[in-house]
Amino acid sequence: MENFPIGTSLDVAFEGLAPESLWQQFDAIRRIPRASTNEEGVRSYLRALADAQGWERDEDGAGNIVLRVPGRGAGEHSPALAIQGHMDMVCVKDDDRDHDFTSDPIEVSRSTVMVSGESHMVVRAVGTSLGSDNAIGCCAGLALGLTPGLEHPPLELLFTADEETGMTGAANLDPALVRSRRLLNLDAEEHGSLYVSCAGGRDLVAEWDLPEIQLGEEWELVAFELFNLRGGHSGVDIDKGRANAAVESLRLLRDVAGELDGFAMRSIESGGLSNAIPRFFRAEFWVLREDLVRCENYIRDFAEALMIRVSVTDPATEWEFQRVSSEERDRAGVSPEASVAIVRALANIQDGVFAWSVVVDGLVETSSNLGVVRGDSQHLRVELLSRSSVDEEVLRLQNRMSSAFEHTGATVTFHGAYPGWVADPSNPLLRTAKQTYEAVFGEAAKVKAIHAGLECGILGERLDGVDMLSFGPEIWNAHTTDEMVFVSSVSAFWSLLKALARNLC
């Protein structure tokens, strides 16, 4: 098969893990580069797999692909069941990791972690994100079709494109691709929970054309870096109190600019995706020579106080301040007046949790994440993602931010809007799933809403009359290099999926 040569042995990290068919598929897919909008390798793999199994397959113009698996046993003539996951992954790596996400496979390892005094086996990546979000869900659907002897309805294994950067695959899904009106989304990350609702969201992008000037010899170039923060998923981790490297650093720059007699930006870089909490920040800026010592002392005081404040949530955080040699570089920078206005505007970006649900206890209703800040002395780009289970709140929040940005000369655009998924108490899938969960595990499942962007909201609009449910295994720290999937939860997740598919026959 393309990108996964026949005869390749199972990686040692997956040896002995159950279910074997699921981990075999995960081992195959983790070898295939699959950043958002670069999923062709996965599609090629799925085409080859379907052809080898004699399954029908179909694709649409948005890059989505469906594999049709005949029903088995009592499900041979049952109504079809769609099982859905997304092909792409969030690609992040440690600063010192040499990895090319366009060509290199994800290197994996197996280890144990202690949780509440108990040891748990986990699979994680080496220096990069793992991509268990959503490869585990995709591979579970494949394993259901590939494992002999299982009873299930005819399956439509739906693999959507570009979920992580805009859900464009789901948003442009050809409705004719999916015939079933029962759909299991396997993109949740907490074992023991059945999800029936999710938040909607929208990206805001602000861009500035900046007034570049050449600075005189009285200006010195310095750099500030903040790195090794924990980061996280901008939906499910937004309420965990983790520091946002961009937010913290921009507040520092605002205060430095207010303290010094001269301040001019040269470059700034933080984050990689709007849906991931930034783990690093670097800025180069000019200060007057007589302000150098005062600048360094102020930054040291700020950074040392920050280290204490984030010691629980982000214990590995580090910082560095240095003078940068500018002898062989041009002396370009943003004008001091514009620099001060820009850092003030950026430091005032509202970030984190804004409102808690009054319907579901402990659920974030509305939040926003400053995910990307990139710029030089001529151009600056900022990307943030706002979410809410009340669609109007996203618009209200971003309209306030947009006005503030435009006041400083920014051009603001909006991208990737997707609706929330409203719970349906009469959902027949939920009734069967609750009964199945209790029968399999001897306890009741938790029925939840999630403050994250599942594709169910969009799919509900594209597929008229579809009933949906979402669940998955235990995945921690998705969208970070600390991402891990708990092995025992994958086995439990598989048991639930098998039993539910049988009970839906």
Image (cartoon, helix red, strand yellow):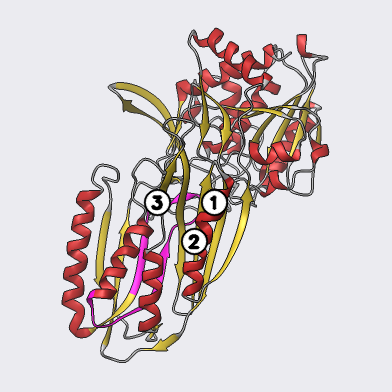
Q: Which residues are magenta?
A: 259-284
Give the residue type at disc 3: Asp
Front: mark 2 or 3:
2
Across and down, in percent, residue 14 comes to 50, 27
Residue holding disc 1: 394
- Most extreme residue toward the bottom is 216
The N terminus lies in quadrant: top right
Seen in the image, is 237 located left or right of residue 203? left
Residue holding disc 3: 94
Give the spatial CA distance, label 1 vs label 2. Answer: 10 Å
Give the residue type at disc 2: Arg
Front: mark 3 or 1:
1
**In the rendered image, the vertical position of residue 297 relative to residue 61, given as above or below:** below
Across and down, in percent, residue 330 comes to 39, 86
Give the spatial CA distance, label 3 vs label 1. Answer: 32 Å
Residue 157 in view = yes
Residue for point 55% across, 29% down: 10
The answer to which image quadrant residue 87 occupies is top right
